[in-house]
Image (spheres, grey):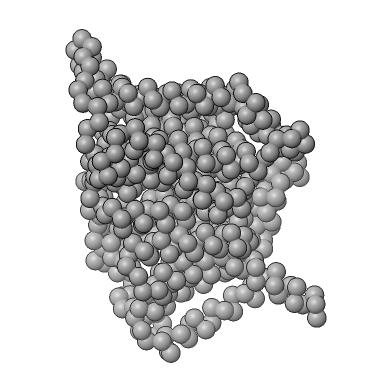
Amino acid sequence: MKALWFLIPLYLLPLVVTSDTVLTVLIFTFLLSILAIGFNIVFGGAGQLTMFHAAAFGIGSYATFLSMLHFGLPFWLGFLVAVVVIVLVSIVIGWICFKFRLKEFYFAVVTMAFAELCRLIALNWTSVTNGTLGMLVLEKPTLWLPGSGIVKIEQTTPWYFLTLASLTVVLVFSALLMRSWIGRNFSAIRLNEDLAQTLGIDTFRYKLLAFTISNVIAAFAGALYGFYTGFIEPSYLSVTQSLDAIAMALLGGVSTILGPVVGALVLTSLPHLIELPAELRVAVYGIILILVILVMPRGIVGLAAGFFKRQTHAS
Amino acid sequence: MTQVVVGQILNGIILGSLYGIIALGVTMTFGITGIVNFALGQFMMIGAYATWYFTDLAKFPFPVAVALAVLISAAAGLLADQALFRFTRNNLVNGLLVSIGLISVTESVALLLFTTTPKNMDTVIAGSWTLGAITLPRMKVVAFLLLAAVIGLTWLGLSRAWLGRATRAYAQNPEAAMLMGVPTKLLQTGVVVYSCAIAGFGGALYACLFSLEPTLGGLFILKGVESAILAGVGNLLGALAGGVILGVTESVGSLYLPSAFRDAYGLVFLVAILLFRPAGLFGGQK
């Protein structure tokens, strides 16, 4: 929990930095951090290598927008509809995967297959999703603030605070979850599933719970992402998107609270810091990923934690 | 109608043999190094572009071009193994991430070198055979036979020769194999390089049949992994069968059901297989 104090300077940052580019990069960092935290709960927590989080991300943005479009709901109620959808989808897919005891690589492949099915539906159900062209989102989320009433989130700075606040909520939630008995049961499953079962942990139920929570968080990231960019397209559900989030979580350090945020920050900002054409930017992204995995396999946060521990032992 | 169905089945078989050659690489690499080389599709892309370059631009005879393409893929594989995969042995997730990084790098380099414009190679073997009402382009038949031959020879080599015994011994128990004098490091590097070489060979034949785009690797690695799981990971001949089954399912499925969901039929089939026969259709042999 102590780690969460680092968020305070981020709240003060817009007082010093007025550059739209910096704030925009940070907004993307926060949004992708939320997605990576979602992944981290199921992988870093319960040890299940899911590939479904990008699909949940995409479903979150599609379902939120479509329920606003067709039922005239405000953003947050629309998101509530998306949560219901994603919980149902997660329970069905999780039930299938965990009932048949799919593990590791096989679990990854089956969840990836389901994610691809969702992407194909988003791509081909043209009458609802507008297919490859995607959908323009002109609506913006509204927020009730004490003092100023209902505000529409449009400019960069309000978006900065909205996404930062969302990240804070998700971080606190995930930190509390991981410290609770639920989180301990997740860890038991990750470390030794058979042993966890012998100790009386209902592994099926806890894996399903981890999978569902993780997908709801990913859907939250997706809903915000779609409304921030003002554009929703089937590539949100792609395998590449899943892999990006996995890369962020691993880069920062799996099974740590802050890892996904640090990873998202590095992978989102570094390619922008170096002036390069778009194609090479992808190459730089790849090189960063390779170097980090080979040089610090426990991630940046894991490495730093190890370093500090050694320092305190020495002194 | 039967004619169309048979035609689609044959198309599926030929496409499936390309999936099969990737599946063979996936299966072999996973058995020996414990990682899934997701970048294998990129070596196929390298082989395909090399073949196109050497036949169409450098005007080499086709067999020479294929040999060069296979060599280049193998060399790239050796480089990737020594620089990257050597450090991620038996670590599935790190291997996966390193492959993703490699995919990003190779794909963007290919985009810079060859742009997104699809490249079409000149026809290598023209004409077609007619069997009753069905016409079969010769190139497709030759490509299928060559791919099946490579997969068959690999299986034969691994089940008969000393190398095969060493490989299987290693897959069963690495420490014991090491104690019996199996050069495990060499074996691991060899498997990675070989899988890249045959992926490059698949790419060379792909270049003769379809148009080339820098993103072709991504599609084929997914299909290759699917085929390998479908057949049962570790089953070498099954890799070909798995690829063919996947190819036929897709081709025939898109005939009767909406073709936009072409990629979905194989996936549904794969999920069903994993749920009801977790060891794969033909059973894996780790």
Q: Quadrant of residue A204?
A: top right
Instruction: Let me know if residue A87 appears in the view.
Output: no
Residue sitting at the far bottom: A16
Q: Residue at x 75, y 43 (%)?
A: A195
Q: Residue B6: x and y, percent?
A: 27, 17
Q: Quadrant of residue A5?
A: bottom right
Disc tally is: 0
Quadrant assignment for the N terminus of chain B: top left
Residue sitting at the far top: B132
Q: Residue at x 67, y 30 (%)?
A: B166
Q: Image height check: is A124 above or below B139?
A: below
Q: Residue A42: x and y, percent?
A: 57, 53
Left or right side of A296 for A145? left
Q: Image height check: is B3 above or below A74?
A: above
Instruction: Let me know if residue A6 appears in the view.
Output: yes
Quadrant assignment for the C terminus of chain B: top right
Q: Nearer the viewer, residue B85 or A232?
A: B85
Left or right side of A231 for A257? right
Q: Nearer the viewer, residue A52 or A286?
A: A286
Q: Residue A191: x and y, percent?
A: 70, 50
Q: Nearer the viewer, residue A267 or B135?
A: B135
Left or right side of B76 for A300? right
Q: Image height check: is B258 above or below A165?
A: above
Q: Residue at x 36, y 24 (%)?
A: B144
Q: Residue A12: x and y, percent?
A: 48, 86
Q: Nearer the viewer, residue B168 or B2?
A: B168
Q: Residue at x 22, y 16 (%)?
A: B129
